[in-house]
Image (spheres, rainbow, N blue to C red):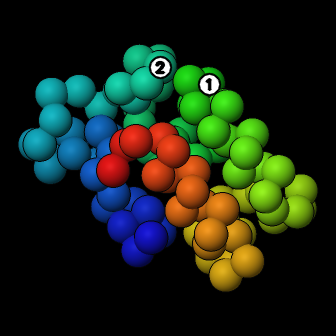
Amino acid sequence: LTQLRTGHAPLNKHLYTIGRADSMLCPFCHAAPETVMHFLIQCPALRHHRAALARSVPPASFTMNNLLGSARCLDALMRFIDASGRF
């Protein structure tokens, strides 16, 4: 969670920046850099998992700040991360 909050998560944008990945592109959609925002909110390939996340939190809570900073979103966020298979 701390890594996602700080942008130092093992996502391709960060890994590419530190020389640990050949590309910064998302491995799911290959259409955009894999940033925290892309992974949690934007990636079309993860929309099924994201829909389950969105159903688990109040609509007003579906923002980066709330997903990464609200205790009430934590369980749903962890289920989304696990379901993505990314980490």
Residue drawn where x is 79% and y is 58% of the image: 56
Measured Cα–Cα span from mark 2 to mark 1: 7 Å
Q: Secondary structure at mark 2?
A: loop
Q: Residue furthest right?
A: 59
Q: Nearer the viewer, residue 22 or 57?
A: 57
Label 2 Cα crowd, 10 Å radius (few <14 / some 14-19 / many 20+): few
Residue drawn where x is 66% and y is 62% of the image: 76
Which labelled disc corresponds to residue 44? 1
Q: Is residue 35 above or below residue 79?
A: above
Residue 6 appears in view: no
The amino acid marked with disc number 2 is: Cys
Q: What percent of the width, then of the height, locates residue 12?
A: 30, 39
Q: Is residue 32 above or below residue 59?
A: above
Q: Secondary structure at mark 1?
A: helix
Residue drawn where x is 67% and y is 31% of the image: 48
Q: What percent of the width, then of the height, locates residue 10?
A: 28, 52
> Do the numbered discs 2 and 1 sit on residues whose CB atoms are within 8 Å?
yes
Residue drawn where x is 44% and y is 70% of the image: 1
Q: Is residue 42 above or below residue 54?
A: above
The amino acid marked with disc number 1 is: Pro
Q: Is residue 5 above or below residue 18?
A: below
Sequence-earlier tag: 2 or 1:
2
Q: What percent of the width, then of the height, locates residue 85?
A: 40, 42
Tag 2 residue: 29
Residue 50 appears in view: yes
Q: Is residue 58 left or right of residue 5?
A: right
Q: Is residue 12 left or right of residue 5?
A: left
Q: Residue furthest left?
A: 19
